[in-house]
Amino acid sequence: MPGLTQVVGRFAPSPTGDLHFGSLVSAVGSCLEARNSDGKWLLRIEDIDPPREVAGCAIRIIHDLQRLGLVPDEPTLFQSTRLDAYQNAVDRLLESGFAYPCGCSRKDLPASGIYPGTCRKGLRNKEARSIRFRVDSGNSGFEDKLRGPVTATLAETCGDFVIRRADGLFAYQLAVVVDDDFQAVTQVVRGADLLDSTLRQISLQRALGLVSPEYMHLPVVLSAEGTKLSKRLQSDPVRDRDPAVTLEQVLHFLGHNPPPALTLELLWDWALSHWNHELVPRTNTTLPTLS
């Protein structure tokens, strides 16, 4: 119908390690949720933290996704090409009073790690190191498509948070918000480990006058020891796994039961016609055994 906004979803990995099963769950879930609504699915490489990035990893992630049938509907966006846009957002937040220079280092933080607002009223003879976003003292919240209402008080859970680091690099929270708006993203489907980040990002969106996407947070894949899979820890890379077997296991993890022994193409056909986010589990669970 005329006037309806097209659904746009995205997957946005950082190139700090190879694609693992936990990241793949987010990629598949975001793709199915977007395309099930006749929407677009985008890929964005969040390469704005060079000290943590692994050489060649971005290209390997792109190739691994393609091998598994995950091809974006537009050219891949690399955040490293968007630095001017992030600086513009920082300038706007400083000018509007939503952000301020901070002279504190990590050692100045209390044991809780929650920033107490030391530099809110000025640097007090300190040299500016980072830029922080001024959080509201009230509750922040949103309606998660899978989990329902999510609320927290950012002043109590994190305090004013960094949007440009002391080393001059832009923080993840800011870059995500700027690029979701730039790419006209209408829905964000990702792991539940990013629930806290969502509240910060919504606060930034409001301060910048941006529209918030719809959010859905998938269960986190845990190792047999009960820890979150991590690219940094080289957890279970999927590169050498059979693509059809791997996709089938992702679908099982997401609460869907495709017929066995389908080809990769037929699995995608089945998944697109049977996807129902209501079937997705709400709780984190362990990594399926991969053959």
Image (tube, grey):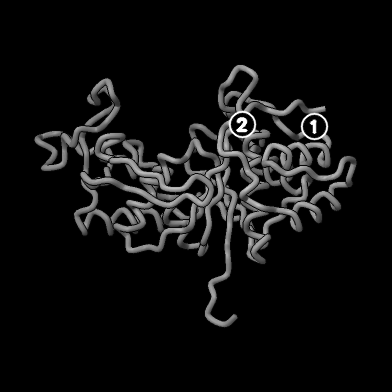
Q: Position of residue 265 (x, y in %)?
A: 85, 52
Q: Residue 240, labelled with which disc?
A: 1
Q: Position of residue 164 (x, y in %)?
A: 34, 43
Decide: is 80 above or below 225.
below
Decide: is 270 above or below 211.
above
Q: CA distance from mark 2 to mark 1?
A: 19 Å
Quadrant for the C terminus in the image: top right
Quarter-wise, where is residue 20 in the image?
Answer: top right
Q: Position of residue 201 (x, y in %)?
A: 39, 49
Q: Residue 255, labelled with which disc?
A: none
SS at circle 1:
loop
SS at circle 2:
strand
Residue beneath disc 2: 221
Identified by mark 2, the residue type is Val
Specify few, some or many for label 2: CA neighbours under 10 Å numbering under 14, 14-19, or 20 or more: many
Q: Is residue 170 visible from the viewing direction of this image?
A: no
State left or right for residue 26 relative to residue 211.
Answer: right
Specify few, some or many for label 1: CA neighbours under 10 Å numbering under 14, 14-19, or 20 or more: few
Q: Position of residue 152 (x, y in %)?
A: 33, 41
